[in-house]
């Protein structure tokens, strides 16, 4: 996912950002919402790391969330156990 997509879904992904960078406050996220550079700077400040390290962390995180909706909003298709392993039988079925 690129930064333009992040900006468009900012309110939806704030929870994921807080999971990744727990030292960032809600106020921090309000301040950096419109700027990737501000976001990198805030990571740098809160974690006491070099700008390059903060940028690398953000770039790596952007790769993990991929296209589409954030992980917290994605739906997972539930598949019955029997379809995963047809020989499994039912729960409690001792063969």
Image (cartoon, rainbow, N blue to C red):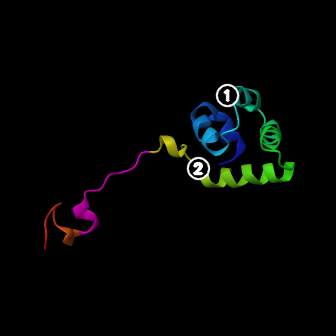
Q: Going 79% across and 37% down the picture, which residue do you hit?
A: 42
Residue 67 numbered tag: 2
Residue 8 numbered tag: none
Residue 55, position in %: x, y? 79, 50
Q: Going 60% across and 50% down the picture, which residue do you hit?
A: 65
Within 10 Å of disc 2 (Cα), the crowding (few <14, some 14-19, many 20+) is: few
Q: What residue span does the magenta drawing correspond to?
A: 75-85
The residue that disc 1 covers is 26
Within 10 Å of disc 1 (Cα), the crowding (few <14, some 14-19, many 20+) is: few
Q: Does the image show residue 55?
A: yes
Q: How far apart are marks 1 and 2 (CA)?
A: 25 Å
- The quarter holding residue 44 reads top right
Residue 60, position in %: x, y? 70, 55
**Majority secondary structure of magenta residues:** loop
Q: Going 52% across and 46% down the picture, which residue do you hit?
A: 71
Q: In this view, does 12 lie to the left or right of 89?
A: right
Say if the magenta span includes residue 50. no
Residue 11, position in %: x, y? 60, 30
Say if the magenta span includes residue 78. yes
Question: For this rendering, which residue is in front, 94 or 2?
Answer: 94
- Determine whether 79 is above or below 95 in the image: above
The secondary structure type at the circle numbered 2 is: loop
């Amino acid at each position: 996912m690129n930064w333009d997509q992040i900006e468009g879904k900012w309110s939806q992904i704030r929870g994921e950002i807080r999971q990744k960078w727990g030292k960032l406050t809600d106020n921090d996220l309000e301040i950096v919402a419109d700027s990737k550079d501000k976001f990198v700077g805030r990571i740098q400040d809160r974690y006491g790391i070099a700008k390059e390290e903060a940028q690398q962390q953000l770039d790596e995180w952007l790769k993990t969330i991929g296209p589409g909706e954030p992980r917290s909003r994605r739906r997972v298709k539930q598949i019955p156990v029997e379809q995963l392993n047809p020989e499994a039988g039912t729960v409690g079925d001792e063969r």
